[in-house]
Image (spheres, rainbow, N blue to C red):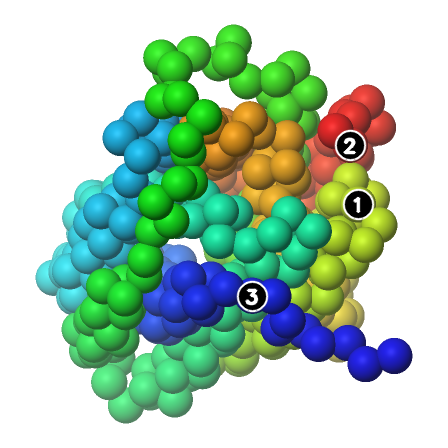
Amino acid sequence: MKINLFKGIAKNVVLLGFVSLFTDLSSQMVFPLIPLFLTGVLNASASIVGIVEGAAETTASLLKVFSGYWSDKIERRKPFVLAGYSLSTITKPLFALATIWPLVLFIRVIERIGKGIRDAPRDAIVAESCDETIRGKAYGFHRAMDGLGSMLGAILAVILFPVLGYKNIFLFAFIPGIFAVLIILFVQEKSDHVKVNSAPKLNLKTLPFNLKFFIFVSSIFALGHFGYAFLLLRAKNMGLSDNVSILLYVLFYTIYTVCSIPSGMLSDKIGRKPVIMLGYLLFAITSLGLAFTSTINSLVIFFIVYGIFYAMIDGVQRAFVADLAPKNLKATALGVFHTFTGIVALPGGYIAGLLWDKISPETTFIYGSSLAIISLSLFLFVKKK
């Protein structure tokens, strides 16, 4: 039987896919270099890397619930998407001015404010632009385009880094970001996307208990999900060069991109819950493996498995939130999800960095694996509907 990977994917989803592609092409020329720039040029510790990454994601997350709610309230999505991507684009070149790590932290936080403004309204457009039966595939397509941009950006970083160095790459990253902002102008909102009365006052009591419990479980998981920065530090810890570390990052995003649409389609077929649970299990295995790996070959395998895991949860969790949310609170629910899973990024990143510095890198990965197992156990009590 012939399977059409792109059947049913609406124009808005395609356009937003290209927006994410160009934005992440820009971002991933910069972000994989930030941990290396902090530790190698500015002499920052792993704890500082954790603080920078955690503070950035937490800042973005605090805004997502408000932008999502406001988007539902005024029944508009596009202005938030345009403003958010524009802010992220104009701040990336500012990393070239950084000479101390607090300035990197400040710029990273400002850039992530743009992400906080745009994410929930954008994800709501994706949910509202496709049929519920292919929602997983639609989110999978969007995340695959995001991953493709990340992969291309990282490849460009590998090629250009030896020639341009850190600061010139930060400046060059501005160009693809401009293309992303221009594409947003062609996105068309559906005029009837939230016509089930206006969104009520922002109150978590208005969300179904099952949705809130899922957000609670995914937040515990996010507390232990240390992110790619610590995978890169692990590669450096094993003696690999900056360029080889970035190549491993490219490998991770290649696997993530290839697996995103199939993961979304699988969740449409068998349900979101088993796909997300399998993703949590893969992360637990990957974390435990990274704690004890001692060879480059095994490190490559764990970067691959990490890519599969990330593809299985990144889009599917968003689709699950959209499934569980009331029709007039899609953006609010997505905003609450992004806020709570992101707000734990600061303490999670700090704990991961502190364990790395004060005890050992292995402890960081055991910590991540332990919280993944706890989350997996709690997920058994989340209902599918």
Q: Where is residue 312? Give x, y as percent.
A: 70, 55
First in sequence: mark 1 or mark 2? 1
Q: How far separated are the C-alphas under marks 1 and 2? A: 8 Å
Question: Left of 45 or right of it: where is 288?
Answer: right
Quarter placement of the N terminus: bottom right
Question: Left of 155 or right of it: where is 6?
Answer: right
Which circle, 3 or 1, is nearer the viewer?
3
Q: Where is residue 248? Give x, y as percent.
A: 58, 74
Residue shown at the point (42%, 62%) measured from the top left: 12
Q: How far separated are the C-alphas under marks 3 and 1? A: 19 Å
Give the residue type at disc 1.
Gly
Give the residue type at disc 3.
Ile
Disc 2: which residue = 384
Q: Are marks 1 and 2 in contact (CB under 8 Å)?
A: yes
Disc 3: which residue = 9
Residue 318 bears which disc, if any?
none
How packed mark 1 is, by other alpha carbons closer than 10 Å (few <14, some 14-19, many 20 or more), is some
Residue shown at the point (77%, 76%) measured from the top left: 3
How packed mark 3 is, by other alpha carbons closer than 10 Å (few <14, some 14-19, many 20 or more), is many
Q: Where is residue 132? Give x, y as percent.
A: 64, 47
First in sequence: mark 3 or mark 1? 3
**Residue 319: quarter of image:** top right
* 174 or 237: nearer the viewer: 174
Residue shown at the point (75%, 53%) measured from the top left: 268
